[in-house]
């Protein structure tokens, strides 16, 4: 996917070495935008394998309004495990359990999950209950009934609740746009981990765009990805350089069953077609 490789090159060529919250160190810069036309294929990176199921399960979890990791770990999706485990390690209850032991407890013990598996009012909570407002439901109704509005917005950035969140929203603000029966979506992402996070973010919001278009009766068009602090962690430099050496492969397609209500989608409604990427490239998450 050319746009993603151009992003990597931009950061490597124009970024500055910076300290960061995780103490890993980054090469970073500020302000970047990419555009992905969904009529050309589903924007899932092909120069390394990206786990589509994890993206789908996480997105359905966001849409449900859930904020506890138990539904994710029961499906072996590990995206959010690091933050509650790090928090648990600081409690008196911590008895030296490994990450694997902690996650097993989350999966099997509902009371333990209730106490130690919740992330606070993160994305799903804000999308579905921003001080009582179901933003997702409202934007879908507005897209159907007032398509030319300039107010088709969902915000995950809630300053009043940031301190209660395991991680303040990185993908913070989105806006939908209708034109000639097509639907486009722009995301503002305040913080962008180019190697690990951004491929997931591109695919996740492209998929959300397709789902909202489906229930509203539109054709999904452009996903516009606007980035604020865009960075490559220093321990990912070798990995991104390996990616840049790989050739592009054809983009896959995603087939989605029809649903009238976005809350009715289930994992089995989605089919990834023709995804033949290069092998996965591992990288450590900085927490």
Image (spheres, rainbow, N blue to C red):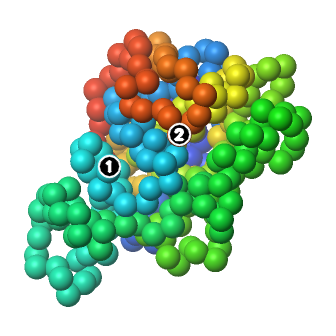
Q: 129 or 20: nearer the eye? A: 129
Q: Do the residues labelled 1 and 2 touch (CB within 8 Å)?
A: no
Q: Name the residue under label 1.
A: 72
Residue pointed to by mark 2: 263
Give x and y (percent) for residue 142. 79, 41
Q: In this view, does 252 lie above or below 186?
A: above
* First along the sequence among labels 1 and 2: 1
In which image quadrant can residue 147 be found?
Answer: top right
Q: In this rendering, would 3 be left or right of 149?
A: left
Is 285 placed above or below 13 here?
below
Which of the 4 image quadrants contains residue 127? Answer: bottom right
| Residue appearing at x 44%, y 47% in the figure | 61
Task: Quadrant for the C terminus, please.
Answer: bottom left
Would you say residue 93 is visible in this rendering?
yes
Viewer-side residue, 167 vs 5? 167
In the image, is 162 to the left or to the right of 53? right
Give the number of the mark in front: 1 or 2: 2
Dot 2: element: helix
Residue pictured at 34% horizontal, 29% vertical: 49
- Mark-to-mark CA distance, 1 and 2: 17 Å
Report crowding for label 1: few under 14, some 14 to 19, many 20 or more residues within 10 A (C-alpha). Answer: many
Tell me which residue sits at (39%, 31%) in the image. Answer: 267
Residue 128: where, in percent of width, then height? 59, 55
Q: Residues within 10 Å of mark 2 (few under 14, many from 20)?
A: few
Q: How many marks?
A: 2
Given residues 11 and 172, the one toward you in this image is 172
């Amino acid at each position: 996917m050319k746009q993603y490789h151009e992003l990597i090159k931009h950061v490597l060529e124009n970024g500055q070495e910076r300290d960061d919250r995780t103490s890993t160190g980054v090469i970073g810069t500020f302000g970047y935008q990419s555009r992905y036309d969904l009529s050309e294929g589903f924007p899932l990176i092909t120069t390394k394998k990206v786990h589509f199921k994890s993206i789908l399960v996480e997105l359905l979890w966001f849409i449900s309004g859930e904020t506890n990791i138990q539904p994710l770990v029961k499906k072996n999706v590990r995206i959010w495990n690091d933050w509650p485990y790090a928090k648990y390690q600081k409690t008196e209850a911590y008895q030296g359990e490994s990450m694997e032991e902690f996650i097993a407890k989350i999966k099997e013990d509902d009371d333990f999950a209730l106490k130690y598996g919740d992330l606070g009012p993160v994305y799903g909570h804000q999308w579905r209950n921003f001080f009582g407002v179901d933003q997702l439901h409202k934007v879908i109704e507005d897209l159907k009934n007032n398509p030319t509005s300039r107010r088709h917005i969902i915000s995950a950035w809630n300053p009043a609740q940031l301190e209660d969140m395991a991680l303040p929203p990185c993908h913070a603000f989105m806006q939908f746009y209708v034109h000639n029966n097509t639907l486009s979506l722009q995301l503002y992402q305040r913080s962008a981990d180019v190697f690990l996070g951004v491929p997931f973010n591109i695919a996740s919001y492209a998929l959300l765009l397709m789902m909202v278009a489906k229930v509203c009766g539109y054709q999904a068009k452009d996903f516009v990805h606007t980035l604020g602090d865009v960075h490559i962690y220093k321990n990912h430099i070798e990995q991104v350089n390996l990616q840049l050496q790989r050739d592009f492969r054809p983009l896959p397609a995603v087939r989605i069953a029809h649903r009238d209500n976005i809350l009715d989608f289930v994992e089995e409604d989605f089919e990834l077609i023709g995804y033949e990427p290069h092998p996965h490239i591992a990288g450590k998450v900085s927490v």
